[in-house]
Image: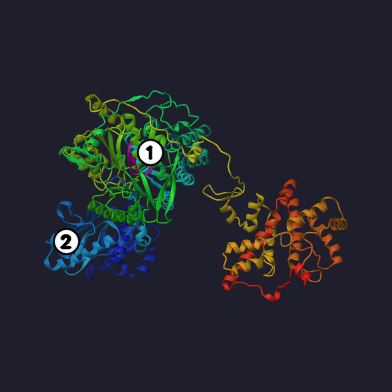
Amino acid sequence: MSAKAICEATGKDLLNRFLNSGGSAVKCQFATVNEDTEWKALVANNSWLKSERLVVKPDQLIKRRGKLGLIHVNSDLDNVRKWVDERRGKDVQVGRATGKLRNFIIEPFVPHKQDEEAYVCVYSHRHGDTILFHHEGGVEIGDVDAKALKLEIPIERKPSLDDIKNKLLKHLPAEKQMFVAKFIQALYEVYVDLFFTYLEINPLVITRDKIFILDLAAKLDATAEFMCKQKWGDIEFPPPFGRDAFPEEAYIADLDAKSGASLKLTIINKDGRIWTMVAGGGASVIYSDTVCELGGASELANYGEYSGAPSEQQTYEYAKTILSLMTKKAHPEGKVLIIGGGIANFTNVAATFKGIVKALQEFQPRLVEHKVSIFVRRAGPNYQEGLRVMREVGSTLGVPIHVFGPETHMTAIVAMAMKKKDIPELPEASHTTANFLLPDGMQQSTTPPRRTSFNSSDDKQKSASPSGDASVDGSTVKPLFSTGTKAIIWGMQVRAVQSMLDFDFVCSRNEWSVVAMVYPFTGDHKQKFYWGHKEILIPMYKNMADAMKKHPEADVLINFASLRSAYESTLETLQYPQIRSIAIIAEGIPENMTRMMIKSANDKGVTIIGPATVGGIKPGCFKIGNTGGMMDNILSSKLYRPGNVAYVSRSGGMSNELNNIISRATNGVYEGVAIGGDRYPGTTFMDHLLRYEKELDVKMMVLLGEVGGVEEYEVCTALKDGRITKPLVAWCIGTCADMFASEVQFGHAGACANSDRETAVSKNKALAEAGVHVPPTFDELGVTIQRVYEDLVIKGSIVPKPEVPPPTVPMDYSWARELGLIRKPASFMTSICDERGQELLYAGIPITKVIKGELGIGGVLSLLWFQRQLPKYACKFLEMVLMITADHGPAVSGAHNTIVCARAGKDLVSSLVSGLLTIGDRFGGALDGAAKQFSHGYDSGMIPMEFVNTMRKKGQLIMGIGHRVKSLNNPDMRVQLLKEYVKEHFPATPVLDYALEVEKITTSKKPNLILNVDGVTATAVVDLLRNSGCFTQEEAQEYIDIGVLNGLFVLGRSIGFVGHYLDQRRLKQGLYRHPWDDISYVLPESLMDNR
């Protein structure tokens, strides 16, 4: 949602901070009271409360407070406090809504005369802003639209003082006109600068030289928060009066803000029996409509939607929130959960359903306790697997689950859930999804079936105009898309591009429709895609200018930029005359920016589809991005060839459902466009309906409108004046809005009625009166479309034509694997880490548990190296080893190499590797050898003296014995520390004890033949593996054999090597050259003999 109402106190605070009217407007002084306010603290912070006469009123988005007796004026502090305390926390009925008064605003009373009250209002619409002013204001103002003077301000224009005076203030006394004009001018500047969408002040008190803002109502464009956060501060958008804000709603709003998907939840009746979990903004409204139409308005518990490809974890959190609300209070008749949605364009149904299933399993006991019945209807990418998973869980959950796919009308499950319709026997679950490549029935027979098809005039169009333009009554119609349409894609949208190419292929286009991609965050290169079985390369450009210059044939740009950059990238696109159409996918672009884009596009004659849309599709020609969904839906809805029915919809998600409905009721879609769910779509219903009216092959049209806005009335006018003559079937969703006690903002930003005329019920009535075929409910939409279509067939407008099977499009390997159609041995196997889910796992342990459990580096090593959580003493020992082996000065070979590389200007990784490559038997790599030698000696039963003698006879050094510097007389403190810790904490140390006995023998011969760090570490690790109780003897030996001990030295010493690299760079040491006097230069032996 974009336009959101704010509290009066919030609006006055913004005006106090940013309104610069030249001193005429008095700053608003106010104090706010809520349920937690203490009067003593309030008075201490607002001393004026004790001296001023006061006004107090609720500040909870309540309209006409004066007429409702909810304003207390000209009172002192004691009476104000008494008035508030009598009402705070008490229920009050306002219209049909009943709610508790919780927030109040107290202001100084402004004495004034009745003739000093005025009215001013600024509101936004598609073509600009309107300022209303009436010289009489207050409670009894009446029909302000009829009384007030109006000043229309076009987009990107500002009103002059003369405009304001001449058009708005002519009924004001002359001496007041100038400073009031300055006030209105400054007010409008704040309105634009802070992205207000509505601002009303009534009354506005105008004295001889001052202006007082008494009552204020306002809305802000919430999507502009990323631009206005610094100016707005922390803005709260309160719920409508009569509907409390629930913490669960705030939680979902927070999830939504952190996600690229859309997650919405509004709790209408927490004790309701019917709960919904619906995918898609348009579909969610239709499900609510259907519940209300079937008499369930009083039992509907919530409105909400999830869309935009949420992850499994996000869907789990969303479902868990709804189930927790649903199972708080029992209902004598049990409860119903409707998990519904249209046919998804790109959301992986199986992934989202897995999240829902996880939540259902978690709440299983409570679902049984509350006698919950679940009804599911969904389709889209991977829906077969999703429905299978849902059916499978239904057999184990202990609650009835009824699962349906695209063969069932979208809202049929609502009537089943409310026992208005019998539940059909579930069709036998498909055990395969291999029919992905061909639509149902096409693989059953080799004889192409016949369909009721269209009387194609495609050849007529081509012969009439070489460019493919059609001629109707002498006027040339340029199709929006054709079989030759070429597009440039803005954004790294590989999946969407491949989907477009597959559509092109199945439509038997001669060439693919995507000629280039633009992405500023990468260099120019080629991106690989598939054209049928063949691989092709599509160029990717960093700059749009390069793409446009090298591909002048492209006339469509599909803009996948984010809401923050879609505006700039669209304006840049409009600089290139070759572009005729732009599709803007992003949702949440600030409305002021959208309106400026529309104006600029209109000035240049460019068609904009969106924002907030999935796009559009012209079967057999071209599709935008992800429109139409996966190939199975394109085939089953026969979108690979044109039909005779053209549609226009606001909802992108519902466009796919319309494809399905139209393909089942008629010969198919000719063209379909989803104009977008924002308040100001780039093109309107009329723009497309008038195009369809002139298209020869369009025999009938379908319009899916919604609550909010008045564009549908323009369609009524066009029908009456003859601009539209073809049969039109229409339905406006959102009929349930009239049945709610408080205002509900639906999923689309524009789906909110601001007057009776904007309600879906009023629109449907007006359309029917204008001659449109309007079904009784959305459930009957398909029936109505079929009836109109069959009438056209009877009249001969449409003639049967054979169905021609389309080419088979190969399925991508990744998607075939997702569907479970193929299997392939993995190239890699791993058992220590899994990053695929919502949270990183180390050996099955979530990273949050690793951090919160304070496992430390030793704990992480135990998980990643040993695949289990070792005891704390073991983890501490591993950390000690890392600390002790971290460094041993710059003179050792590894550190020396690292330093030389660093001084040669090499990078950190190269320098580190040069040091690591020196690790071996002679330097640092003796741990594995020491472990094997000492454990073999101990295990074979050799006494230490025998062990030493055996090694001497073999001519082998004893690994882990000896040091160049340290000796019995100069002991190594690192060894001492390790020995003391191991002896104190390890349950047993037989191999270490054996090594210490060996040390006694070797040091008796030479005092520096001590057990060194490698030796004590190696033997201690062997004792740990064998005696900790965490490993079998076979596992312990395997870890020794595969080199885990050397890993400890490598990891520890890497710390020191990195330190030496950083030290050399910090000291800015130059290239190292070894001094001559440290090198012994000798001649080859052969030359020495000759000499």
Q: Is residue 263 above or below residue 1015?
A: above
Q: Position of residue 738 (x, y in %)?
A: 28, 42
Give the structural element (helix, strand or loop) at label 1.
Answer: helix
Q: Nearer the viewer, mark 2 or mark 1?
A: 1
Taking depth in this image into account, of 264 and 956 the one nearest to the observer is: 956
Give the structural element (helix, strand or loop) at label 2.
Answer: helix
Q: Is residue 501 above or below residue 945?
A: above
Residue 900 picture quarter: bottom right
Residue 871 picture quarter: bottom right
Q: Which residues are magenta?
A: 615-630
**540 falls in the magenta region:** no
Q: How is the image coloured?
A: rainbow
- Residue type pointed to by label 1: Phe
The residue sitting at the front extreme is 1090
- Quick one: label 2 or label 1, which is nearer the N terminus? 2
On residue 528, the disc is none
Label 2 – label 1 distance at C-alpha? 68 Å
Q: Which residue is mark 2?
A: 114
Taking depth in this image into account, of 193 and 512 the one nearest to the observer is: 512
Q: Residue at x 85, y 51 (%)?
A: 941
Within 10 Å of the Cα at label 1, are there few (<14), some (14-19), or many (20+) other Cα atoms?
A: many
Q: Which residue is mark 1?
A: 503
- Residue type pointed to by label 2: Gln
The residue sitting at the bottom extreme is 1077
Q: Position of residue 833 (x, y in %)?
A: 59, 49
